[in-house]
Amino acid sequence: DVKVTQSSRYLVKRTGEKVFLECVQDMDHENMFWYRQDPGLGLRLIYFSYDVKMKEKGDIPEGYSVSREKKERFSLILESASTNQTSMYLCASSLPSIGRGNYGYTFGSGTRLTVV
Amino acid sequence: AQSVTQLDSQVPVFEEAPVELRCNYSSSVSVYLFWYVQYPNQGLQLLLKYLSGSTLVKGINGFEAEFNKSQTSFHLRKPSVHISDTAEYFCAVSTYNQGGKLIFGQGTELSVKP
């Protein structure tokens, strides 16, 4: 069964800590995405990547960075965690959008991060 | 730029009743449209998608959606819901020039009561 795996379901971190959220996919997908989900706001795009060592900012990149050293792994980094980064973080992957098609995403189960 | 609006944040309904979850989008170019479902403490799962062709799209679990270009809508329907359909539902849009990125709506909580 193909899937996207996020390393932690629940995390509790202290303000100011550097936090790493890991995401691994086994579908050989080129595209990978990080979203955060907050009640009433839906999913907001933080960063995405179309290939190894490539990254692009989404709609809310401030306070975050990413790393993609291998095709299957896309890491989200909170440089100095703050309480307003308490949220559900969702990783997704997809095939490239070829021509006029779009395959949609496969999502991981999410990491619920609490910053205290 | 594209945007998606889900018109209802919460929809309570009784078991075996029909339901419609509303989604409107804004785009200056042709769109691809998606509905995802999120069960409690899980990631999102694809219910159905519209890329082209027939405007009535059937998905998993008995759901269907209709693409209406003139109304810029993509409403999700099910003729008879079950308790197990209780979840949050997200509408999303993408276009050919978005490189596969999806823009999501705010979500609709469907609560099915016995």
Image: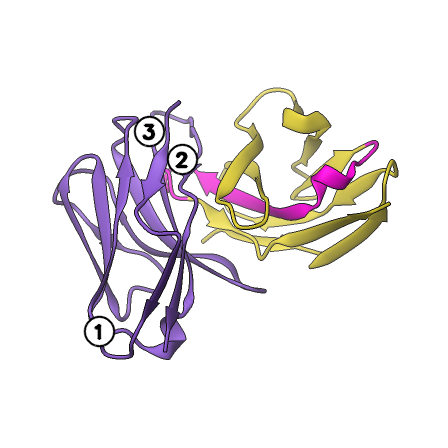
Chain colours: A purple, B yellow
Q: Quick check: do tags 2 and 3 share a chain?
A: no
Separation (CA) of disc 2 from disc 3: 13 Å
SS at mark 3? loop
**Circle 2 residues within 10 Å: few <14, some 14–19, many ≥20:** some
SS at mark 2? loop
Task: Name the foreground residue: B107 vs A88.
Answer: A88
**Do we see residue B59 in this rendering?**
no
Residue B61: image x %, image y %?
68, 27
Classify residue A42 as left or right of residue A31.
right
Asked if disc 2 and disc 3 are in contact, CB closer than 8 Å, the reply is: no
Q: Quick check: do tags 1 and 2 share a chain?
A: no
Is residue A7 part of the magenta span, yes or no? no
Classify residue A66 as left or right of residue A113.
left
Which residue in the structure is indicated by mark 1?
A17
At 81% across and 41% down in the image, what residue appears?
A: B19
Chain holding disc 1:
A
Which residue in the structure is indicated by mark 2?
B96
Task: Name the foreground residue: B42 vs A95.
Answer: B42
**Do we see residue A28 in this rendering?**
yes
Query: Label 2 is placed on what type of residue?
Result: Tyr
Residue B53: image x %, image y %?
59, 20
Chain holding disc 3:
A
Is residue B91 part of the magenta span, yes or no? yes
Residue B57: image x %, image y %?
65, 25
Classify residue A15 as left or right of residue B114.
left
Separation (CA) of disc 1 from disc 2: 39 Å
Observer-side mark, 1 or 3, equals 1
Specify the segment rendered in magenta.
B79-101
Query: Label 1 is placed on what type of residue?
Result: Glu
Q: Is residue B71 above or below residue A40?
A: above
At 18% across and 38% down in the image, what residue appears?
A: A51
